[in-house]
Amino acid sequence: MFFVGPAGYPPGSKGALQAVENVRKLNLNALELQFGRSVNLSVERSRELAPRARELGVALSCHAPYYINFNSDEENRAKSEERLLSSLRSADAMDARIVVVHAASYMGRSPEEATVAVIRSLKRIRRTVVDEGLRPAIGLETMGKTGSWGTYEEIAEVMAEVEGVEPVPDFAHIHARGQGCLRTEEDFRAALEKAMDLHPGRLHCHYSGIEYNAKGEKRHLPLESKEPDFALLRNVLPRSGRDFTIICESPDPSGDAVLMRRMLE
């Protein structure tokens, strides 16, 4: 089954509850709440979303604040860990399945050193997650800039050391970091199978068009840019056997999510 929806509230939504209802009105069945600068939805308010989302059949996820870098100095690392924990607490209260996170930048260190730092932070976070009984998975997003931590190989290293972690393939980021590497169905199949091999369950994905340069991602583009072409991914997605959530991160996430949903029907 495919769960498709926008990153952020659909236009005209006054609050998270109305956003869930507006997603359903668009014939979409997923919504990723964006905690861009901070976790702006308390645990108490998050609890109000769960019954309505279940009633409407809308799958919820969350994106942790962008101000997270586990490969930083001690003060910022501690703040990053708390930001992800706050996201997980709100996500748990709304019955969201996963919290997506941009885990780190290299900051002049080697990829190996950054991976060690990510593992250390996530192990600390997981101890609190277990103690508090928090249910959402931690989703490590593939990143689009060459200076950002988050290749499939790096994510796999973390998953080998930390439980409760999943890959989140962002196909626009993969395309940008690979200098336009997703051009054929075989390209998409290979990228998809890497994630499916890492995680056998429901796969959470991001999609949009993207502009890039030698350093990777510059900015997200509409679906119509075909950079990369969503039709190629559509053609290789398995139609049975597992579930996929596809969150649209284009400049028009709701409108393009509707287009993606139609293409998948």
Image (spheres, rainbow, N blue to C red):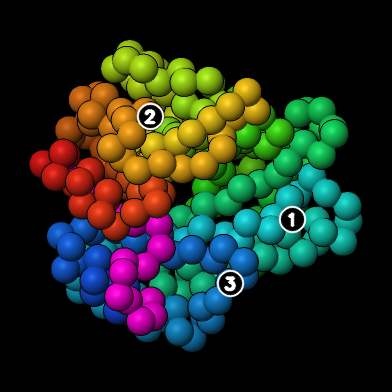
Hey, which quadrant is residue 82 in on the image? bottom right
Three-letter amino acid code of the residue under disc 2: Glu
**Res. 39 mark:** 3
Looking at marks 2 and 1 on the same chain, the residue that comes earlier in the sequence is marked by 1
The residue shown at (28%, 32%) is 230
Q: Tag 3: residue type?
A: Val
Give the residue type that dot 1 points to: Arg
Q: Could you tell me which residue is drawn at 70 percent across and 44 percent down?
A: 104
Q: Nearer the viewer, residue 260 or 210?
A: 210
Separation of disc 3 and disc 1 at Cα? 20 Å
Q: What element carries label 2?
A: loop
Q: Name the residue under label 2.
A: 227
Residue 114, x across and y down, in percent: 78, 36
Residue 204: x and y in percent read 39, 45
Residue 65: tell me if it is visible: yes
Quadrant of the rendered structure where residue 15 is? bottom left
Give the residues in magenta: 1-16
Q: Which mark is residue 124?
A: 1
Other-residue count near label 2 (Cα within 10 Å), few / some / many at <14 / 14–19 / ≥20:
many
- Mark 3 Cα shell of 10 Å, populated few (<14), some (14-19), many (≥20): many
Mark 3 near mark 2, Cβ–Cβ under 8 Å?
no
User: Would residue 181 appear left or right of 244 to someone viewing this image?
Assistant: right
Q: Nearer the viewer, residue 38 or 189?
A: 38
Quadrant where the C terminus lies?
Answer: top left
Left or right, 19 with respect to 136, comes to left
